Image: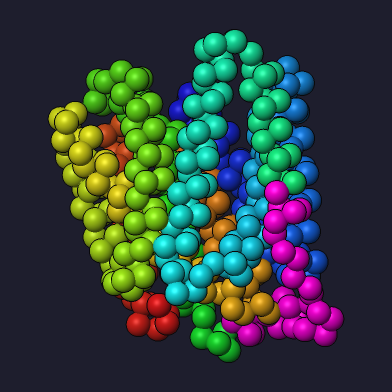
Amino acid sequence: METITIGMVISLYGVSKTLMQIPFGVVSDKVGDKLTLKIALMLMALVPIGYIFSDTTFKAGSLYVIQGAILGMAAPATYSVLARTLNVKRRGECTGLASAVFTLGGGIGAAIASFILSKFNSFNMAFNIAALGIFLTLIYVVIRVDKVKVEKGKINNKASIGEILYEIKNRGFVYKIIILSSSAFLGDYIYSCVVALIHFYGQDVLNVSTGYTSAIISVYLLVFGLAAPIAGWVSDKIGNRKQFLYSFLLMNFTLLGLIITRNITIFTVIIILYFLGATYLNASVQSCLSEFGAYPEIKGLVFGIVGASESLGYAVGPLVSSYIYEYNKNFLFLGLLIVSVLVTIIYLALFNKSKI
């Protein structure tokens, strides 16, 4: 039951993040992305302080779910700010650089926390520094991010959800949103499964140490952080349509290889190639998503839908995969391949209608 319990905890985090993104995508359009982001950051700065006072696993787990909800509040506003500030001629490169910063931030934060724990053995110090870092981010947003006036009478301020959905359909964006949402779902579905279960898979199937599996997760962060700007630059050069296809092919073939191999060296090479495929897929998703920044009447809802789909993958992935793993440990990557193939089929069926 241990893997199922871990899967459920991670899933609840993803569920709370999913539920918040669509409504706060609309809120971001109503009150402005800067204000929404400031409120989310103020709340997020309190989360590390809350962990200091969480003296039971239930309290810590509940706070983790709340943390997911606050991140769900911030995500659409973050996409909105990025979309309106990037260089449209270097869209992929800009979004790739942003993705790299997001990922490396998590890796650097984890490294700092590990150093503090090993040097001072103080969780409280780590949490206080995290709160300070979020507060400094809030100050940066207040000073450096320009405020966009939300004009009265505009559709993005007064329109109902039904009118916004009609606008999306009228502009022919439905298929594009389906592709972006399913691709975003896939990325976090597989990532959350790897994070939740790779340690168990390494011990039970590959017979490797926890140090090896921890290194695999670190390598993912490193690959994603270093390759994301390059992947964005490539998408600018070859186009997102081709990059989507090449990414899906690489991901599917590498997942097939991970099902078959038990050799540690080969497994390591293949999973790094998978990480590259996922990085290039994410770069195309982010590049295409940023294009909606040119449509202020619908962008908030679109950012919310795609972000919620991504979070849903994070929520559902560990839960489904933990049950698959309990049934048969060797089926972990087979389950991931099936989902990846299904999303690939969605892309192949819709890309001609999607305006990608």
Who is closer to the viewer here, 349 or 254? 254
| Residue 106 falls within the magenta-colored stretch | no
Rendered residue at 16%/31% (across/down) = 265
Looking at the rendering, which quadrant does residue 322 occupy? top left
Rendered residue at 68%/79% (across/down) = 297
Is residue 106 something that shows in the picture? yes
Residue 127 lies, in percent from the top left, at 67, 25
Tell which residue pokes out farthest to the right in this image. Answer: 152
Tell which residue pokes out farthest to the front in this image. Answer: 143
User: The C terminus is located in which quarter?
Assistant: bottom left
Vertical side of 301 occupied by 280: above or below: above
Residue 2 lies, in percent from the top left, at 48, 24
Tell which residue pokes out farthest to the bottom in this image. Answer: 170
Vertical side of 156 occupied by 117: above or below: above
Rendered residue at 52%/38% (across/down) = 106
Residue 140 lies, in percent from the top left, at 70, 49
Vertical side of 335 occupied by 180: above or below: below
| Residue 160 falls within the magenta-colored stretch | yes
Vertical side of 133 occupied by 253: above or below: below
Q: Which residues are magenta?
A: 140-168
Residue 205 lies, in percent from the top left, at 26, 26
Rendered residue at 39%/55% (across/down) = 229
273 with respect to 107 (left or right)? left
323 with respect to 295 (left or right)? left
Is residue 259 something that shows in the picture? no
Who is closer to the viewer here, 103 or 302? 103
190 with respect to 109 (left or right)? left
